[in-house]
């Protein structure tokens, strides 16, 4: 074999895994205009847990009150509902058949329109008992869907058409499962940006949305870590922000250039960071409880920090205040600039899903399906409502046009069954 052939083989094996050329041809599907009232990816349109304020979702609901429709979900997953146009999209997985798949629903009726199996086989038995094989939330640009899966010891990003036909599939990195995986893709201009931190040494990568080709890739430390890459405007420029691996890092979205990085987070983080434009908030839970406010101007300055445990639920910022819920069910308000605690309010239960801000209300759901609603009030804790639905909720609910799309499980004939609920007046 000549040197040219050997070089070609080495190049091929170094590249991400793609479908063949015929499979990459994208079918013609009518695109959807993504509106500001839609919820096209993890943490909503602004990537910060803040829903469109011009809506009035219910304060009260139950199995028999304010349920517009209810549709069964195959398998199990913590992928939050993605809502664009008249469609709702979810990722899920079935351990009995070892399949990972994406589901599409009609937003008006709740009817399941399609199911596309991405992987069959290749499941790992490792991971936290709370983890699933489908915890990444689908991202939608109005033309394609993007989602991440771990399968057969590697992290993959997959693109589908709006009617569920697979366009491409790219391997990002090998992946050693520790607790699990839940990083969701972020869309920026013509790119989809993904992350897969793990003990084997992970990566943050940007792929072309049209064909999955790798544009840039950054190697990461050999530590387990779980946040999604979040793109926010801070210190005057849009940055990919990543916490964990004992670092806080700002990255240029189009090029992958590291703008700055500093110590200022613990090893393992889960939450998606938020910002007031000057500071970014980090929080983690292993090997220590840790919360901090870091300047994102390249100075690396940690302005304040404390030892509050906000490990899984992400935080919210409105004005000069942070609103959060700890893993063990305490709502807290801080001054974002100083870190001074303003108030605390006991909710109850264990929380894995993140709070969502809708106008002047914050909605947050615990692991047994109890949703608490409290007011955005920097002076005092003010509980507005409390509701129960299902027996288990880990996915963060989605809020669109005064309706709530919630993924919850119930016991049906002695077996766990997930449902997608549409809650509205």
Image (cartoon, rainbow, N blue to C red):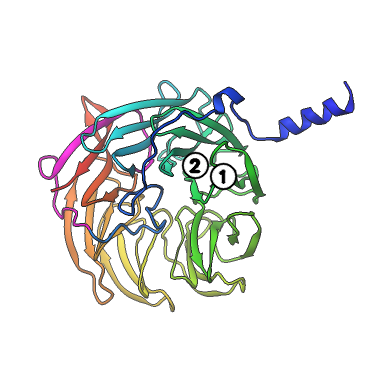
Instruction: Answer whether residue 145 is visible to the viewer in this image.
Output: yes
Instruction: Please tell me which residue is depicted at 53% across the width and 53% down the height of the picture.
Output: 268
Q: Is residue 192 above or below residue 158?
A: below
Distance of label 2 from label 1 (alpha carbons): 8 Å
Q: Is residue 391 left or right of residue 5?
A: left
Q: Which residue does the numbered mark 2 point to in the structure image?
A: 181
Q: Is residue 278 left or right of residue 383?
A: right
Query: What span is colored magenta in the figure?
Result: 55-82
For residue 46: magenta?
no
Q: Is residue 233 above or below residue 109?
A: below
Q: Which residue does the numbered mark 1 point to in the structure image?
A: 196
- Magenta span: predominant SS is loop
In the image, farthest residue toward the right: 2
Q: Are marks 2 and 1 in contact (CB under 8 Å)?
A: yes
Helix, strand or loop at label 2? It is loop
Instruction: Please tell me which residue is depicted at 49% across the width and 67% down the height of the picture.
Output: 280
């Amino acid at each position: 074999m000549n040197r040219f052939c050997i070089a070609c083989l080495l190049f091929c094996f170094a590249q991400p895994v793609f479908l063949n050329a015929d499979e990459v041809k994208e079918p013609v599907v009518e695109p959807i205009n993504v509106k500001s009232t839609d919820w096209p990816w993890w943490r909503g349109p602004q990537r910060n847990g803040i829903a469109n304020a011009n809506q009035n979702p219910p304060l009260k609901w139950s199995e028999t009150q304010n349920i517009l429709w209810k549709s069964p979900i195959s398998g199990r997953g913590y992928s939050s509902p993605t809502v664009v146009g008249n469609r709702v999209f979810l990722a899920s997985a079935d351990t009995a058949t070892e399949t990972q798949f994406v589901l599409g629903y009609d937003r008006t009726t709740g009817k399941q329109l399609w199911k596309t199996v991405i992987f069959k086989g290749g499941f790992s038995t490792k991971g936290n008992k709370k983890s699933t094989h489908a915890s990444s939330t689908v991202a939608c640009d109005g033309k394609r869907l993007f989602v991440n899966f771990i399968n057969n010891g590697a992290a993959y990003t997959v693109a589908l058409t709006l009617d569920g036909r697979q366009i491409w599939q790219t391997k990002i990195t090998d992946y050693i499962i520790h607790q699990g995986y839940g990083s969701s893709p972020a869309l920026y201009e013509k790119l989809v940006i993904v992350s897969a931190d793990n003990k084997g040494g992970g990566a943050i990568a940007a792929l072309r949305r049209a064909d999955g080709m790798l544009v840039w890739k950054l190697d990461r430390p050999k530590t387990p870590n779980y946040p999604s890459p979040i793109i926010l405007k801070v210190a005057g420029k849009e940055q990919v922000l990543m916490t964990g691996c004992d670092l806080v890092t700002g990255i240029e979205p189009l090029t992958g250039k590291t703008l700055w990085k500093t110590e200022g987070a613990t090893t393992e983080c889960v939450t998606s960071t938020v910002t007031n434009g000057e500071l970014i908030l980090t929080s983690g839970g292993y090997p220590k409880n840790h919360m901090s406010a870091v300047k994102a101007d390249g100075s690396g300055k940690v302005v304040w920090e404390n030892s509050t445990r906000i490990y899984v639920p992400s935080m919210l910022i409105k004005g000069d205040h942070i609103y959060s819920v700890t893993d063990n069910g305490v709502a807290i308000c801080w001054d974002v600039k100083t870190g001074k605690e303003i108030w605390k309010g006991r909710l109850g239960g264990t929380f894995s899903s993140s709070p969502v801000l809708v106008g002047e209300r914050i909605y947050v759901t615990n692991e047994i399906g109890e949703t608490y609603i409290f007011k955005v009030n920097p002076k005092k804790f003010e509980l507005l409502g409390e509701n129960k639905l299902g027996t288990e909720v880990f996915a963060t609910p989605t809020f669109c046009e005064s309706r709530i799309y919630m993924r919850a499980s119930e016991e049906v004939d002695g077996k766990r069954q997930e449902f997608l609920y549409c809650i509205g007046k």
